[in-house]
């Protein structure tokens, strides 16, 4: 009986193997088909530029934070001109602060201020929330934390960059910067280091080695140098158009009015540096990277899952309450037409503005902005990115 059982078992195995082999061709075909679909979906997805900005907010870094606030919009504007194989990549920015005594010591004196986001108003708000206070600056720790916490994705066309800026030795803390660099390399993330101080001092503090390990750029900047904004003859007209642009937003939903107030608040923050910085923000607001589909009906209507049937009358602005779906649609279309015309006008004026600034600028080294934009363009070429 035992021999029979073994024979049956062997027979069953042979039959199973035969059946498996009979289906192998079909299974392989299905596998290839699924892999092709997956690869096609990944390739069809719009590429993204993902930038994690890691800023030292210890006592001596007020100048660095000021540069970040003053230059955010020019950085965004430069990235809006990027192309990847004829596609216009999306932009996501994350922000960490480190080296501040007000932060949790057990977590390494660091904090995620905002995870990857394409909400430019929220990113601006996060930057303006930063304050400085003396502390311990652990570069390896904050890099490793950013790598583990953020969603870097799997798309090989994405440009994944970390920019870390500070002025203490890169070697501080119990997390080796070399281990952090190895982890970055494994995740296709390039680490760029910005030393706030003298170039050779940064090299001796291992900031250059930290960049070299992931094929990133090492840069040294004068973080205390005030940002130079060049006024142009087109600034007043662009700011006038910004007021009209704001009037094209249709706030809806629970957070609609709050988000519209945030928009106005970040306009004021940009203007607090000077008129030219407010102009840079207006240019960003007129670009494809400024998207507000979570609270603005004009942007929301362009989303694939949007439906007028889903709108809650109570969450509509007063001018649309009680209106029919057709009337709401007509109103949204009118605002869209106004916005597109204003965006076109701002873009045309900005071309003239950029040409004017290029002719009248004598300072080619504008701190954080120049360092970041140059590094991004250099590394983007490796993934076939180009600039308009």
Image: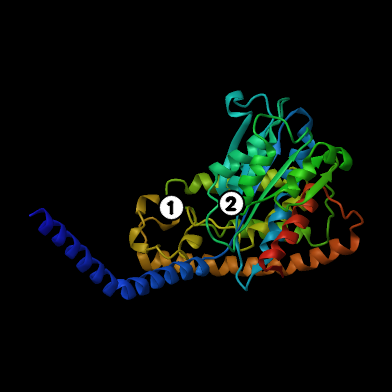
Q: Which residue matches tag 2?
A: 187
| Left or right, residue 256 beside residue 240 | left
Query: Which disc number belongs to residue 318?
Result: 1
State the image coordinates of residue 372 (x, y, percent, origin top left).
75, 52
In three-dimensional space, the C-alpha distance between marks 1 and 2, rounded to whole angstroms, equals: 48 Å
Residue 75 x %, y %: 72, 54
Do we see residue 122 in this rendering? yes
Is 204 or 342 nearer to us in this picture? 204
Q: Nearer the viewer, mark 1 or mark 2?
A: 2
**Relative image position of residue 108 (x, y in whole percent):** 62, 29
| Residue 106 point in image, percent of width and height | 58, 24
Q: Dot 1, crowdedness within 10 Å: few (<14), some or many (≥20)? A: few
Residue sitting at 80 percent across and 64 percent down? 354
For residue 217, side relative to residue 200 (left or right): left
> Looking at the picture, does residue 357 appear above or below residue 125?
below
Instruction: Residue at 33%, 62% (x, y): give it.
Output: 309
Q: In which quadrant of the rendered view does residue 202 lie?
A: top right
Q: Mark 1 or mark 2, which has the lower sequence index?
A: 2
Callout 2 secondary element? loop
């Amino acid at each position: 009986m035992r021999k029979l059982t073994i024979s049956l078992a062997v027979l069953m195995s042979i039959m199973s193997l035969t059946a498996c082999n009979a289906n192998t061709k079909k299974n392989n075909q299905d596998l290839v088909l699924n892999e092709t679909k997956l690869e096609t979906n990944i390739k069809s997805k719009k590429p993204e530029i993902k930038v994690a900005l890691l800023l030292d907010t210890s006592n001596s870094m007020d100048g660095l934070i000021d540069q970040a606030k003053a230059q955010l919009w020019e950085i965004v504007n430069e990235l809006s001109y990027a192309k990847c194989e004829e596609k216009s990549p999306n932009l996501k920015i994350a922000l960490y602060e480190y080296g501040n005594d007000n932060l949790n010591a057990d977590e390494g004196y660091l904090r995620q201020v905002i995870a990857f986001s394409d909400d430019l108003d929220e990113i601006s708000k996060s930057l303006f929330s930063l304050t400085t206070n003396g502390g311990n600056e652990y570069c390896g720790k904050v890099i490793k934390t950013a790598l583990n916490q953020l969603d870097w994705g799997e798309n090989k066309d994405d440009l994944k960059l970390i920019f870390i800026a500070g002025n203490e030795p890169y070697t501080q803390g119990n997390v080796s910067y070399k281990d952090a660099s190895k982890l970055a390399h494994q995740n296709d993330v390039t680490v760029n280091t910005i030393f706030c101080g003298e170039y050779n001092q940064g090299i001796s503090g291992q900031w250059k080695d930290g960049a070299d390990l992931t094929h990133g750029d090492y840069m040294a900047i004068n973080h205390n140098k005030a940002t130079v904004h060049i006024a142009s003859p087109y600034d007043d007209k662009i700011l006038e158009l910004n007021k009209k642009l704001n009037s094209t937003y249709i706030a809806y939903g629970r957070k609609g009015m709050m988000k519209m107030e945030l928009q106005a608040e970040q306009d004021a923050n940009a203007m607090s540096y000077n008129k030219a910085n407010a102009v840079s923000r207006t240019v960003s607001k007129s670009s494809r990277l400024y998207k507000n589909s979570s609270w603005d009906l004009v942007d929301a209507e362009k989303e694939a899952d949007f439906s007028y049937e889903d709108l809650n009358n109570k969450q509509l602005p007063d001018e649309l309450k009680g209106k029919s779906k057709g009337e709401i649609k007509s109103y949204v279309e009118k605002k869209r037409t106004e916005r597109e015309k204003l965006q076109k006008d701002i873009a045309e004026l900005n071309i003239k503005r950029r040409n004017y600034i290029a002719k009248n600028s004598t300072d080619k080294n504008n701190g954080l902005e120049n360092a970041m934009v140059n590094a991004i363009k250099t590394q983007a070429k490796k993934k076939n990115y180009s600039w308009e």
